[in-house]
Each structure stands twice: as structure tokens, then as C-alpha cells.
Amino acid sequence: MPHILGGIRTFESDWTPPLGGALLKDLESDSAETNLDIGCVAAHGMFTCDDKRCHAISPLGKPATAFLLKLIARLQGLGTVPMIETRAYARWLAN
């Protein structure tokens, strides 16, 4: 059975810093059934997780757009979205 992506998107976070160590520690739990793969705090940045660890990307100029493009890229890898070159757009947004 293919992996089902888990994600969250919110506008703001009360954590200080919003995408800091506390969030990353919680994301790196042992249960694959409760893990989040991708998320966005639109006012601050985003995070992505793979099978090894989680990475916060903060600050970003357009985190909600970067989140969308990263999500589409992840879905493409699962074969559920038509192919477009989203990674090129994501790199442009990171600058």
C-alpha cells in the first residue's frame, strides 16, 4: 500500500521560534501512522520530513506557495499528480 501523506497548514504559530527545535522534536516521533510529512506556517516558513528526519525551512518570502509546490512534487513522486517541474519554482521561491 502506498504511503499516505500527512500535512498541516496554518497561518500563525504561538511557538517561539515557530519552526524551531520543539516542533522538529515532536515531528520526529516513532509512529509512522501519526507523523506529518509536510507543513506550513504561512507567516514564518514550512517544514518537510522524509524517512530519516525533518527539516524546517524558515524564513521564506512565500512559504504558502513553496509549501504548495513541495506538496505537488511529493504527490508527483507517488504518481497522483500530473507531471510539472515544481522543484524549479520551489528553488526560485527560496531565493
Image: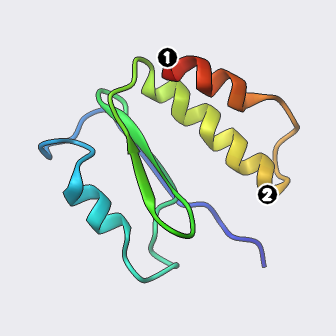
Q: CA distance from mark 2 to mark 1?
A: 27 Å
Q: Foreground: 9 or 28?
A: 28
Q: Foreground: 40 or 28?
A: 28
Number of numbered markers: 2
Q: Which residue is labeled 1 in the image? A: 95
Q: Earlier in the sequence, mark 2 or mark 1?
A: 2
Q: Foreground: 52 or 8?
A: 52
Q: Looking at the image, which residue is at 56% across and 62% down?
A: 50
Q: Is residue 63 visible?
A: yes
- In the shown orientation, is residue 37 left or right of residue 42? right
Q: Is residue 40 visible?
A: no
> How would you rate the neighbour count of disc 2 (Cα within 10 Å): few for under 14, some for 14-19, many for 20 or more?
few
Q: Secondary structure at mark 1?
A: loop
Residue 46: name its quadrant. top left
Q: Position of residue 78 (x, y in %)?
A: 79, 57
- In the shown orientation, is residue 9 left or right of residue 90? left
Q: Which residue is labeled 2 in the image? A: 78
Q: Looking at the image, which residue is at 61% across and 39% down?
A: 70
Q: Looking at the image, which residue is at 49% across and 17% down?
A: 95
Q: Position of residue 55 (x, y in %)?
A: 42, 51
Amino acid type shown at disc 2: Leu
